[in-house]
Amino acid sequence: MSETTATGTTASMEGRDRGRVRGRRAEIALRSLQIVLALFYGIASALPKLIAHPSAVESFDTIGWGSAAMYLIGALELAGAVALLVPVLSSVAAVALSALMVGAFIVQLTSFDGENAATPLILMVPLILIAWARRHRTADLARLLPRRA
């Protein structure tokens, strides 16, 4: 299997094939992660806020922010969930949702005595991974924006 051919070694060709398979698997795993996070943010996090579920209303009353902030944060989460599924927006969406999770962490510490404070931090790990892995798409997004003279 290590014979040399006119185009190179068989071993190096097998290595490239393995790299393509590994790259394809990583792409599928990353895309799956984006879908799972989009479903979480859209259904489990944004929806209760947008329909004024009693648990969400109670939480925002405890914080002292009221319904306007609840709807705003729900809308931001829903927008982030949708943007995670749009290839050119996925990196920016992951960064924006990470920033939202920093705020959620601070609120958990200050208003809820740290109860569930680890949840936003745990959610940030895959978001940061997506932001890093899709960072080249931010340059694609910048190219789509009109230039001012």
Image (spheres, grey):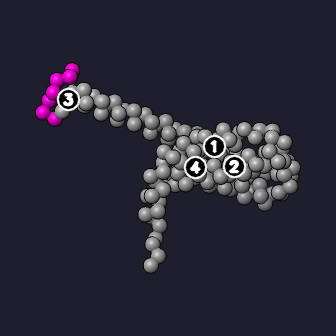
Q: Position of residue 99 (x, y in %)?
A: 65, 52
Cα–Cα span, label 3 and label 1? 43 Å
| Mark nearer the viewer, 3 or 1 | 3
Q: Position of residue 37 (x, y in %)?
A: 60, 42
Q: Is residue 4 above or below residue 107?
A: above
Amino acid carrying label 3: it is Thr
Point out the image quarter for the N terminus: top left
Of 51 and 89, nearer the camera is: 89
| Mark nearer the viewer, 3 or 4 | 3
Q: Residues within 10 Å of mark 2 (few under 14, many from 20)?
A: some
Which mark sits nearer the N-terminus, 1 or 4?
Answer: 4
Q: Is residue 121 left or right of residue 132?
A: right
Residue at image point 48% right, 51% down: 135
Amino acid carrying label 4: it is Ala
* Label annotation for residue 94: 4
Which mark sits nearer the N-terminus, 3 or 1?
Answer: 3
Whether the residues at callouts 2 and 1 have beta carbons within 8 Å, the answer is: yes
Which mark sits nearer the N-terminus, 3 or 2?
Answer: 3
| Mark nearer the viewer, 4 or 2 | 2
Q: From where the camera sits, is residue 101 visible? A: yes
Amino acid carrying label 2: it is Val
Q: Quadrant of residue 128?
A: top right
Which residue corresponds to mark 2? 102
